[in-house]
Amino acid sequence: MTRDQRTVGIVGLGFGRAHIAAWQAAGCRVVALCRRSLDEARGVADRYGVPEVFAGWEEMLERARPEIVVVATPPRLHRAIAEAALAAGAHVLCEKPLARTAAEARAMREAATRAGRVAMTCFNWRFPAAMARLHAMVEEGFLGRVFHVACRYFVPRWAEEGVAPTWRMDRREAGHGAMGDLGVHLIDLVRWNFGEFARVSAHAGVAYPSRTVPGGGKPADTEDFCAVLGELASGAHVTLTVSRVSRAANEHTLEAYGTRGAVRYRLGREGEAWYRGDLQAASGLGAFAPVSVGTALAGSAGAGDQLEVTGRATIGPLVERFLQGIEKGESPSPSFEDGMRAQAVLDAIAESASRGGWVPVA
């Protein structure tokens, strides 16, 4: 089957809208969109030339029968939608965090194995050109034995107290707060580049105790910021700092230092081609110097609004890997296995933030 014959259905049109641009740029046909508000779904469908819209994902799976299903809903729904899509014979790309708990994520991974379908987690921040170059340098041994890694992810989205709450403030819907929304990307980048977490210790907080979940049924109960100290199986130390209430900041960074060298990575949201990222490196006793990073992206990747650019530039390369996985009959990394392992780290962080002290990662 050629790419222009592969059909895609997308459930959830918040960040899910970024996926439309990514799949269309890859030559696939997005044939169905699903959102609770049909009027809003129709507006998005008209913008991108998508023929069908649905208010319920069950109806979308039954009537549109897409070959590929993208799950971009609150995490509470990830397992049910993914398992139903896999049982219907579809391949699945699921947004992060893969689920609310590692147990849910494990069930999703097992469902994908039983179905024999491609199943990947949308860890799209592996794919900026500067991060890909950093990964290659680590694989080549540029750092030597790694001593410590420092990561941060700061955004200002809920810095104002009066901003309306969303499902992300509700642990029943989201499972985790800033760590599930932002920190899970850092967890994945650390795992991908430097290996598994052995244990973590965390401290987290809620910015505005006056906030409630949508509808006002209870106080918001997911963290707005969190600081994590971790130890990898290799013995390397890791610090993770995340915030969704950081005024004027919109970036994520990673620094790593080892026996032979050091690297500094940053991805902000300012300037042209921001999606490439910036990388610096130092070897021996030398100072940091810029590292040239190429990109195979088409010039059109930078066209459109922020979600469309994010889709084409960072989800697009993941989509290419996903399609190659279908052709080869395998689930490439970042797979549901990667999503599950990242979820286990999230669970340990949540436990440590709740009771204090070090918590081993299962």
Image: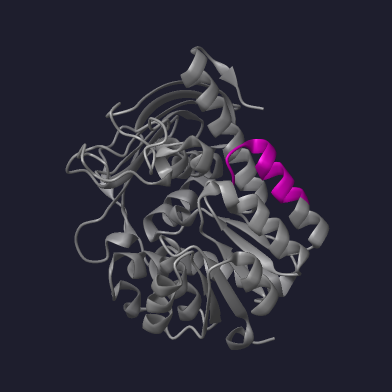
Residue reaching furthest right?
Answer: 114
The image shows residue 49 at horizontal and vertical percentages of: 44, 86
Q: How was this image coloured?
A: one colour
> Is residue 50 or residue 122 the one in the foreground?
50
78 w.r.t. 342: above or below? below
Magenta-colored stretch includes residue 346: no
The image shows residue 34 at horizontal and vertical percentages of: 52, 69
Q: Is residue 273 left or right of residue 91?
A: left
* Residue occupying image coordinates x 73% and y 45%: 107
Place residue 151 in its image quadrant: top left
* Residue occupying image coordinates x 27% and y 66%: 273
283 w.r.t. 271: above or below? above
200 w.r.t. 327: above or below? above
Residue reaching furthest left?
Answer: 248
* Residue occupying image coordinates x 54% and y 22%: 351
The image shows residue 242 at horizontal and vertical percentages of: 35, 35
> What quarter of the picture does the C terminus occupy?
top right
Total numbered circles? 0
Q: Is residue 65 left or right of residue 135?
A: right
Res 264 visible: no
Question: Magenta stretch: dominant SS?
Answer: helix
The image shows residue 315 at horizontal and vertical percentages of: 46, 64
Magenta-colored stretch includes residue 107: yes
Res 157 visible: yes
Q: Which residues are magenta?
A: 98-110
* Residue occupying image coordinates x 33% and y 68%: 309
Place residue 1 in its image quadrant: bottom right
Place residue 323 in its image quadrant: bottom right
